[in-house]
Amino acid sequence: MKKRISVLNLVIALSLLIPAPPSANAQETTRKEHRRMNWAENLPESVRNFHGKRFTVLHYHTQHETGHHPKPGTKTEVESIRSAVRGNKWLTAELRARKIRPEDIQWVERTMNGSLIFYIK
């Protein structure tokens, strides 16, 4: 009998340690923050400060394979992203290692985990 009570107490204690799933309101806040990060006026600062994380490079002509077609910004927005890449020496060196010049970049997206996706010609 004593063993059953201790097992039951252990199960209750463990169930109290399991965190509750985030509320729908918290998830919506996270989505809104992600959309805000990808606004054209916020992207150059993200690119300029990007350092030491993973990034992905995708060609626009392969987008039919992924099913994701990002809408590029205006010419001034794209140019501001390119100048932000030029201003980030670490990122410029990493892109140069992959034989990508800032002029090749057509658009950038920031993912939920903070990495970047570069879309090139």
Image: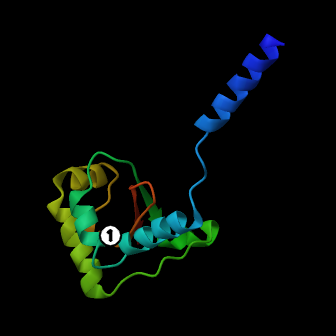
Q: Is residue 66 above or below residue 113?
A: below
Q: Is residue 119 above or below residue 11?
A: below
Q: Is residue 3 above or below residue 117?
A: above
Taking the spot 27% from the left edge, 63% from the top edge, the residue there is 47
Total marks in image: 1
Taking the spot 53% from the left edge, 64% from the top edge, the residue there is 27
Question: Dot 1: within a 10 Å radius of its alpha carbon, few (fewer than 14), some, or many (20 or more) residues?
Answer: some
Q: Is residue 77 above or below residue 103?
A: below
In the rendered image, which residue does mark 1 sit on? 104
Locate residue 53, reporting x and y percent: 34, 47
Q: In the shown orientation, is residue 41 left or right of residue 10?
A: left
Which residue, as the protein is rendered here, is positioned at the far top? 2
Residue 120 visible (yes or no): no
Which residue, as the protein is rendered here, is positioned at the far right? 1
Q: In the shown orientation, is residue 83 left or right of residue 118?
A: left
Q: In the shown orientation, is residue 78 left or right of residue 117?
A: left
Locate residue 15, reporting x and y percent: 67, 36
Three-letter residue code for mark 1: Asp
Residue 66 visible (yes or no): yes
The one of 30 and 91 positioned closer to us in this rendering: 30
Locate residue 22, reporting x and y percent: 56, 56
Splitting the image into 4 quarters, where does residue 109 fall? bottom left
Locate residue 50, reporting x and y percent: 27, 55
Taking the spot 60% from the left edge, 49% from the top edge, the residue there is 20
Label 1, secondary structure: give it.
Answer: helix
